[in-house]
Image (cartoon, coloured by chain):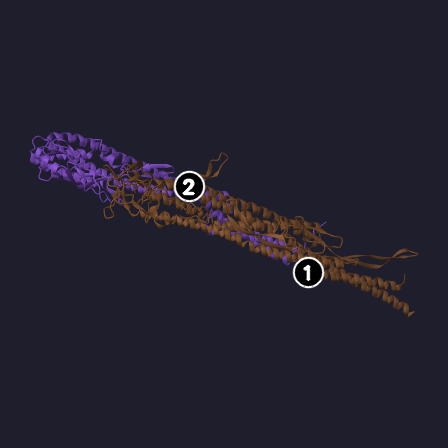
Chain colours: A brown, B purple
Amino acid sequence: MGLFDGLSTGMRGLHAAQTAIDVTGQNISNANTEGYSRKKIEQQAAAISHDMFGQIGIGVEVTGINRVRDAFLDRQTWEMLGDKGMLAEMDVAYTRLESILREPSDDGLAAKMNEFWASWQDLANNPADLAARESVKASTSVLTDVFHSVYKQIEDYGLSMNNPLVQKVETVNSLTGQIQALNEKISGMEARPGEHANDTRDERDLMVRKLSQLVDIQTVEDPNGRMIITSGGNLLVGPTSSMKLETYGVERVLADGTKSSELKLRFTDSGKVFAPRSGEMKGIMDARSNVLNDYLMQLNSLAKSLVTEVNAVHLQGYNLNRNTAVNFFDPTKVKANDITLTDSILADAANISAAENGKIAVVSTFNPAGGIPAVTAPDLDLKAVNILYRDLVSGSVQIKLSDGTILAEGAGKDYVVDYEKGVVTFLNYARYAAGDTVSVNLSYYTTGYSGNGNGQNALLIGQLRNKKSMAPGADGEPTQSISSFYGAVVGRLGIEKNQNTSRLETKEYLIAQMDSEQAAIAGVSLDEEMANMIKYETSYQASAKYIQTISSMIDVLMAI
Amino acid sequence: MSTRISFGQISNRILERLFQNYGKLEDIQQQLATGKRIQKASDNPVSVSQSMGLRSEIDQYSSFQRNINDGLAYLGTMDTTLQTANNLYQNMRERAIQASNDSNSADSRFFIGKEVRGMFDQMVALSNTTFKGEFIFSGTNTQEPPYSMRSGEAMVKTVPGLLDSPFGGVGVPSPLYDIQATDSGYTQGYTTAKYLIPGTVRADGLTEGTDFTVNYVQGEITYLTPAAAAAAAAGIRVTFDWLRRSEKDLDGAQNREIEEGVIARINSTATEIFGNETQVNAWEAMINLLDGALNNKPGKIRSAIDDIDTAMHRQLGALSTSASRVLRLESTQIRNDERTIYTTKLQSDVEDVDFAKAVSDFNMQQAIYDASLKMGARALSKSLVDFL
């Protein structure tokens, strides 16, 4: 071992310290870089065999620069991130739903429903008062408007969720493409022995982390350093290529027949349907297809019960125009998005049936004296012997000619009837002649129509407020009133949201824990880097001093 | 092994805690600003369901209160009317007793009769009392007066047409069909006239008492002489005033829901107050009294006094029924008030912020937030670099 060997030992020391300072510099500069893992220099003592002394040291050797990172923690974090992404998207949907329903408040569905019932009570007090009738009409219009608006807002929100889905699919495609490119780069670089593609791996881990928030993934690294990514058994990033996703529209039919269109996912190449198991994409699809649609159906069943229950009572009642069997709500529109008053009530509040049934007597056939009057004669009074029929049951008059032909009632047809006065006006003399015998069938109120001052039916409708008509229990009997059913829906929304939030918070806490653990391993500690810097600086100075010493020793030798 | 703590770790943790603390601060701030503990369903799902139920209940109580107030106003009108009617009966009874005295001459009875006629009209007017434009004694047919004075006209013929009154022969009581009878809204028709007003029956060329007599209550005319009968058979016109009872059902109940599921009736009907046609009714009593007074029949007056007593008793019964209804409504009103207060308090307990607690929470949370900001700022600024 000669003096000149000492020079080379010193050189190695200088070189190692220099490299270490470089790594420290890189770590300090990237202390705030997302996804950066701190790098650590690996060095070992270099030695050669000596024939007299055995192994003899010839200085230090840098064997590599490795990144410090726990790959197992990463994989766990990615899995959690998928759940978190899903729960976070659900949380957004629940929050939005809550703000759409706006309960408890003075202008939500519950408050408007209260006003609706109260207006019936007021009508029961003043059944003949048109103002009270208009007030029922108005409170119902407000209620149906709120139904429509709440339904529309939820529906629109559901449709609007298709846009972020499209964006997220694009992001997934872009990420898988980039990961694939990085895979190539890493496998190329690491093909050279001893070389680690540290920073490229950091970059890839960051991409995978982003991808894991969007969709559930499983990762495997092949011997060449390529990361193979699958999702629920479907290949997303393969050894040589990445699989692109795309969206496609389908029509969805809910359990109650409501139709909606929504986007689903499939692979562009194979056309195979792709259903994520977690991640933001799953969250959006679940919130849209399950959560929102479920609440839409609840609203629909609420509207349906309201229409059915109110109509059932309303049909029994009598209105100011003495008609019965009039619907209050349009019976063909039983959903929250189209519930509405019938045209006849929209046209005239007098058609609201506030009165109860009168006593009806059915009269069998009789022949009015004189038969059909002449065109110029007064209209035919409906009278048999000395009973003059008035207060007839609307629509009950049927007139038959002696040959059995049944005449048609209505303007522009054979005859019209004034049901209050009991008078028939014949219109179509082409079908019959004056003096023809006719037989008449009719029903009339024996005690007369129960009167405009009768509010019994309005009272019955007002009492529906507390009638249990929804949510059948185990015995098939309804367990909830319309109002309490809605209260339960709102309560359930709160509970579901809270469950979701607490699950989300748990995941966020776990992720923060794992991130913190990873940061403890892979994060840059400036204090540590500072200490290293001083350590390597001193080491550099020492190596330089050593070279200087060797050099002066050589000088001494040369001076001999 | 000592734990490595990196820069990123510290800054993340500090930020996370800051957000948490600020979020809590914001929650309390919102509670204080709105005065409500529950802003949305998820704040406390059980409370929200409860609160919605309570709101609905309070709303319902206010409906019941409106129903009761309306009912009380209605009963007030009814009560006043029945009191007035009672006074009228008392006066009528006094006049009747006066007229029944044998010392009275036909003339003085006649003048008492004129006075009784005035009272009769007043009674008809009372029966037509309205509340908010609706007849209160008409049951549910509130658009039509229960009783009305009509000027009737009957055509009598031997072979009657549809609208003509029949002629039954000498000494046979025959009904009078009023062809003028026009119910509200009807253009033509006839009605059997009953409760004719004594002193108003006129038959063409015939004189009441000598040519014919009238059963006022039943509305039947009896021709006494062959000459009168012959005139009637040839066709005569009879005019008369009569009290027409509405053909509608006057027995309908006016109900108000005063508590959940409790329906209270608030009206008394014409039948309950004046009696129906099969009973000894008020109108019959008054017509008999009029008949007795105007036509100088002391016996009729005496029997009419008993009938007036019966009618008065019936009317007093209605008066006390109405008074008991007022009591029932008033006691329910008090109960409803108490329930409203109790439920409102309950709602406030569920929904409203306890201000003292919220303010102290706010202060505490603010202190925590301040502290976390200060400590965060200090911890982040420290590094070995400072000492190199």
Q: From this viewpoint, which residue is outermost toward the bottom?
A: A559
How many residues crowd mark 2 within 10 Å: few (<14), some (14–19), many (20+)?
some
Q: Which of pointers 1 and 2 lies earlier in the amino acid sequence?
A: 1
Which residue is identified by label 1?
Answer: A30
Nearest to viewer (mark 1 / mark 2): 2
Q: Is residue A132 above or below residue A387?
A: below
Q: Judge whether residue B7 can be spotted in this image.
A: no
Residue A456, picture quadrant = top left
The chain ID associated with circle 2 is A
Residue B251 coordinates in the image, percent (x, y): 28, 36
Q: Is residue A544 left or right of residue B261?
A: right
Which residue is identified by label 2?
Answer: A309
Residue A334 coordinates in the image, percent (x, y): 45, 46
The chain ID associated with circle 1 is A
Q: What number is the disc on residue A213?
A: none
- The three-letter code of the residue at mark 2 reads Glu
User: In front here: B58 or A61?
Assistant: B58
- The three-letter code of the residue at mark 1 reads Asn
Residue B104 coordinates in the image, percent (x, y): 7, 33
